Amino acid sequence: MRSWAIIIPTKILKRCFFSKQIACLIFDVNIYPYSHRNCQNWDFTTLLLKKTLDMFVQNNQNILEIGTGHLAILSIYIAKKKKANITAVDINPEFIKNAVVNAEKNDVYIDFRQSDLFSNIEGTFDIIYFNPPYVPTEWVFKNNRELYSNSIFDFTWNGGPDGCDTIRKFLKDVKCFTHKDSKVLLGVNSVFVDRYKMSMLIAAAGLTLDSIISSKCNPAKVYVIKLEKY
Ligand SMILES: C[S@@+](CC[C@H](N)C(=O)[O-])C[C@H]1O[C@@H](n2cnc3c(N)ncnc32)[C@H](O)[C@@H]1O
């Protein structure tokens, strides 16, 4: 039986993740409303990526966000703080439509594109970051079945049988869009895919794990990845 000690914080957390006011307060981004049960405004990984972007992004860099989401909350956050050239993509065309409006509401310019990972991307970038879908399909079936819709919206969370389908594809292709000083920032919640598994995936793709960014009370980790080819 689940105890109240677990149920209450989960409910409070959900409220935080879906609250426009809290998102606005943390990320300094105005939130254009979008209603879909899969679409919370942010999660633990978004929060840690924000901290990591503060550490790595500099003015005038070329930046690419994969999986920007319906709000493009991280790309808008960076666009407001830095003079960077930001391209942001998502596989879900509905998300891109909403992200374009959200960027206008926040008075920033971002080059938005619908793209399955790098399929609609050319060139190289100084920083590439991604908060990918990493939840194993089975986990949602057991714990949160109403999230499963058998549609493009499942890409928001569904990482396949072991949570790593999209992570593997991303790591395989990312090399073609980097130069020798690029940094790849991949945020993953370690409740679903742990540090050991991530190290194995990064090594298997021929990449080098430079460092891991973490934060107290946050189960997410951001893997800072370098390229071995140079
Ligand atoms: C966990 S959400 C992250 C949303 C937002 N960036 C954030 O950090 O809160 C994952 C996002 O990746 C997108 N996505 C999943 N697979 C993708 C793919 N193959 N190519 C591009 N975007 C993808 C989903 O549609 C979703 O918007």
Image (cartoon, rainbow, N blue to C red):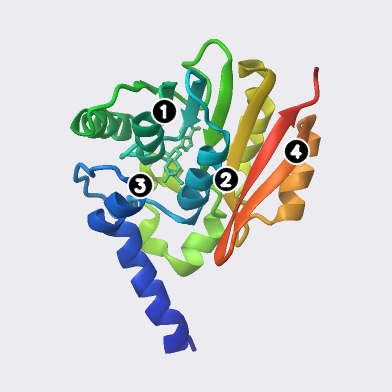
Q: Taking the image as drawn, is residue 228 in sight?
A: yes
- Label 2 neighbour load within 10 Å: few <14, some 14-19, many 20+: many
Measured as percent of width and height from the top left, residue 42 is found at 38, 51
The residue labelled by disc 4 is: 210
The residue labelled by disc 3 is: 27
Q: Taking the image as drawn, is residue 151 in sight?
A: no
The residue labelled by disc 2 is: 187
Looking at the image, is mark 2 or mark 1 nearer the viewer? 1
Residue shown at the point (22%, 45%) measured from the top left: 34
First reached walking from the N terminus: tag 2 or tag 1: 1
The residue labelled by disc 1 is: 82
Residue 78 vs residue 138: left or right? left
Real-space CA distance between mark 2 and mark 1, rounded to the nearest whole angstrom = 21 Å
Relative to 221, say whether 216 is above or below: below
Where does ligand 1 appear, by image quarter? top left
As shown in the figure, which amino acid type bears the numbered disc 2?
Gly
Real-space CA distance between mark 3 and mark 1, rounded to the nearest whole angstrom = 14 Å
First reached walking from the N terminus: tag 3 or tag 1: 3
As shown in the figure, which amino acid type bears the numbered disc 4?
Asp
- Label 1 neighbour load within 10 Å: few <14, some 14-19, many 20+: some
Real-space CA distance between mark 3 and mark 2, rounded to the nearest whole angstrom = 17 Å
Element type where label 1 sits in the image: loop
- Label 4 neighbour load within 10 Å: few <14, some 14-19, many 20+: few
Q: Is mark 3 within 8 Å of ligand 1?
A: no
Q: Is mark 2 within 8 Å of ligand 1?
A: yes
Element type where label 3 sits in the image: helix
First reached walking from the N terminus: tag 4 or tag 3: 3
Residue shown at the point (29%, 58%) measured from the top left: 22
As shown in the figure, which amino acid type bears the numbered disc 3?
Phe
Real-space CA distance between mark 1 and mark 4, rounded to the nearest whole angstrom = 24 Å
Viewer-nearest residue: 179 or 160: 179
